[in-house]
Amino acid sequence: MPTVSRRRFLKITTAVGAGAAASGAAGLTLPDLLASLPEDGEVRTTPTFCDLCFWKCGAIAYTRGGRLWKIEGNPDDPLSRGRLCPRGTGGIGAHYDPDRIRAPLVRRANRGDEEWTEVTWDEALNVVAERLERIKAEHGPEAVAMFSHGIGGTFLKHTLRAFGTPNIAAPSYAQCRGPREVGFNLTFGEDVGSPERTDIRNARCLVLIGSHLGENMHNTQVQEFAEAIEKRATIIVVDPRYSVAASKAQHYLPIKPGTDTALLLAWMNVLVTEGMYDKEYVEAYGFGFEAFEAIIGRYTPEWAYTQTTIPPETIRETAREMARHRPATLVHPGRHVTWYGDDAQRSRAIALLNALLGSWGRRGGFYTPASMDVAAYPYPPYPTPERPKLDNPDGRYPFADGTLSNGIRDATITGEPYPIKGWFVYATNLLQALPSQEETLRAIQNLDFMVVVDVIPSEIAGWADVVLPESVYLERHDEVNVEWFREPFIALRQPVVEPPADQKPNWWIARRLAEKLGLGEYYPWRHVEEYLRQRIQTAGYDFNELEEKGIIRGPQQPIFFDEGVPAEFYTPSGKIEFYSPQLEGAGFDPVPTFTPPEEPPPGYFRLLYGRAPVHSFSRTQTNPLLSEMMDDNEVWINEDVARRHDLRSGDYVRLKNQDDVVSDRIRVKATQRIRGDCVYMVHGFGQQARGLRRAYGKGASDAQLITRYVNDPLMGGTGMSVNFVTLEREA
Ligand SMILES: Nc1nc2c(c(=O)[nH]1)N[C@H]1C(S)=C(S)[C@@H](COP(=O)(O)OP(=O)(O)OC[C@H]3O[C@@H](n4cnc5c(=O)[nH]c(N)nc54)[C@H](O)[C@@H]3O)O[C@H]1N2
Ligand SMILES: Nc1nc2c(c(=O)[nH]1)N[C@H]1C(S)=C(S)[C@@H](COP(=O)(O)OP(=O)(O)OC[C@H]3O[C@@H](n4cnc5c(=O)[nH]c(N)nc54)[C@H](O)[C@@H]3O)O[C@H]1N2
Ligand code: SF4
Ligand SMILES: [Mo]
């Protein structure tokens, strides 16, 4: 079923002569870029924060003779502590990327053909306003949906809310950490948030369940992980693949993919039956422990062995190790947890294991984040939409507490509960981020209008009617970051250099568009600096100081129960819910249970995917500095499996999935570092947009092969590790 439109997709993207790609050369090379960097002239520094991913590390950018030269960590910033990750350091490549979109574009051929006419901003925004107004007149403002990722979307979301739509989503919920937040909320009454409230650096025992820190480069976490290792914390890593984190572990558990909940249940069984859990903590704060205890008794390590392939003795030994260090034992909640469709319950099992260890609210476990008090800007109230948001009709997913991107896509395809006719897409590459590219393309074909705001001619931009080129983070202000972290602080993003061509910052686009939509009253300020200054000064801080230092830090506040944080739990019972009446009432298991995911058919391997240290998702593959370090991906295949297929490292294969979708060619990495029942690849490669000269045709795309997904029945997230591939040798 998905093959048809995939072929169409491929045909469209390869058949038509590409403007940019036709020029052949992949633009700037690293030596070109290095040679072009300024060597003399006055050195100036500007503090700002990074946007190569969404962690928002404080940075100091240097110019020389007025040109961008280098970027380093801001030592005053609590997130970066003066050090950026490799991607952050490569951030200047985003400014110099020769593939950037230089002017607003209007489509002049079929959608997806990537054929454009360059227009002025006035012309482009007139088209956008006119098309949005037409949809509003015919179908109501709710028929325009917005997808947005990151802090840069703040002002455009403001404009769209003023326009009157409630349908605003980010794939970082239902394709990333949504299930985790739901699992923790059901248990502790609070979510984990971002940055995660994990006290990694004080953990005496750290358990990583597929959180591949070190490849997953969220800066603060990686730094704290290194600190924990230095302080000789016990590291336990559970991963079907011997990750970088696994190489630092005392206990590596090469689990059968998809069976983590069974392991978690068995760990809890050992803690409870051997009486090693934190009894005082559970007695003081727990709800429904007796009912939980009765159920958890079933899940012996011997039973878990049959599911996970982890020997019972290993399960007992690691459970005892966790108990030995409690409450400074942190079972990391993970972040990208949309794996198998039972993810909210698996996350709840992780929450419950932490509860048994007494780690929530305790040093070396989970802290209570603090933030500065900065009030929202006093905008006029938004109009109340006549129809509620449609991503979760009839509360089908009763515990969804964010908007489901996939729900908006469903409605765009079916027209139910009401039609969606326009998509406004900001900084999210929906073709790589949502499972089933076929469904995304079907939804796009149903639209009257799609506008994409991007910095490069990305895959999603290729399907737009209008593309608006944004200035990159080093060229603009953004919303101020009032962070929730282990210490409170405010951080400012501000321009370091001018954009190279006719690119504009999001706040300018949002404000101009609002004016053209007759919503000028929602922008009482003229320049974003006025807005930022007002928010900061009203809160009682000095905006000039913020501009000068990039950071204003607040006083350290208590962040643990024993420092005076009240042990409050915002669940219905006001306690940690070992047994969940909420879940029971909605017809779900009140204590997590385990149902194994579907097995790969004979000859097939489960497709797993993850991060590489030098890339972010699908957003950095054209960056001239980062692509030089890694310009394609490989598929990890167990050495014995490779031998049976007569494959060696360096050979090329294509992966064919259960729906007969065939990937681009990809290099084999034959290794003992992965189990024989799965293969692994780095996400973000195999991109099909021809304007991405450095990335086009490099490596293969996991997203293309993720034609199937399983919705989490609690909250509607999309489990994506449910696809299977075979290996086809490439001549
Ligand atoms: N198959 C598969 N799907 C996944 C994942 C996976 O690993 N595999 N990961 C999931 C996870 S964890 C997440 S959080 C989501 C993330 O998914 P997305 O939010 O889609 O993340 P990116 O791929 O970074 O897409 C960012 C888009 O923004 C553009 N962009 C970059 N900088 C700027 C800017 O300054 N301004 C503007 N306007 N645009 C910019 C990029 O060119 C790119 O088109 O994907 C999820 N989906
Ligand atoms: N360099 C870099 N760092 C990033 C990002 C990036 O794009 N680039 N993105 C950031 C974002 S938004 C997110 S959400 C995080 C994502 O990073 P994480 O949340 O750490 O990890 P995932 O992507 O969920 O998982 C990938 C790991 O899980 C393992 N795995 C796969 N299936 C299973 C299983 O069934 N059980 C177990 N136990 N393990 C399994 C894989 O082998 C791999 O090691 O990374 C963040 N950090
Ligand atoms: S983790 Fe790296 S890429 Fe992300 S904000 Fe920090 S320095 Fe930038
Ligand atoms: Mo994510």
Image (cartoon, rainbow, N blue to C red):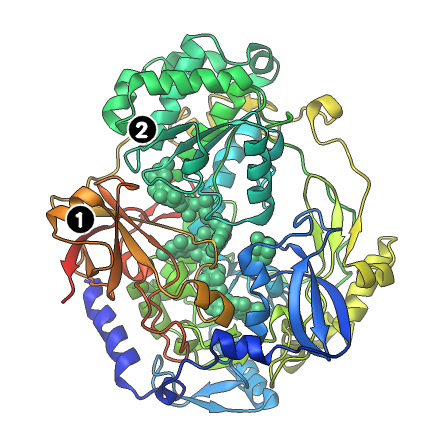
Foreground residue among 358 and 379: 358
Say if residue 424 shows up in the picture.
no
Q: Residues within 10 Å of mark 1 (few under 14, many from 20)?
A: some
Mark number displayed over residue 594: 2
- Residue type of the residue flagged with mark 1: Ala
Q: Locate residue 497, reporting x and y percent.
A: 69, 76
Q: What residue did someone put label 1 on?
A: 642
Foreground residue among 336 and 67: 67
User: Who's the residue at 41% across and 80% down the image?
Assistant: 26
User: Who's the residue at 76% across and 72% down the image?
Assistant: 43
Q: Locate residue 579, reporting x and y percent.
A: 46, 21
The quarter in which the C terminus is drawn is bottom left
Q: Is residue 451 left or right of residue 731?
A: right
- The image quarter containing residue 279 is top right
For residue 16, above or below residue 587: below
Q: Secondary structure at mark 1?
A: helix
- The image quarter containing residue 657 is bottom left
Mark 2 and mark 1: Cα distance apart in space: 32 Å
The total of numbered circles placed on residues is 2
User: Who's the residue at 53% across and 20% down the image?
Assistant: 357
- Ligand 2 within 8 A of label 1's CB? no
Q: Residues within 10 Å of mark 2 (few under 14, many from 20)?
A: some
Q: Locate residue 548, reporting x and y percent.
A: 82, 62
Foreground residue among 230 and 17: 230
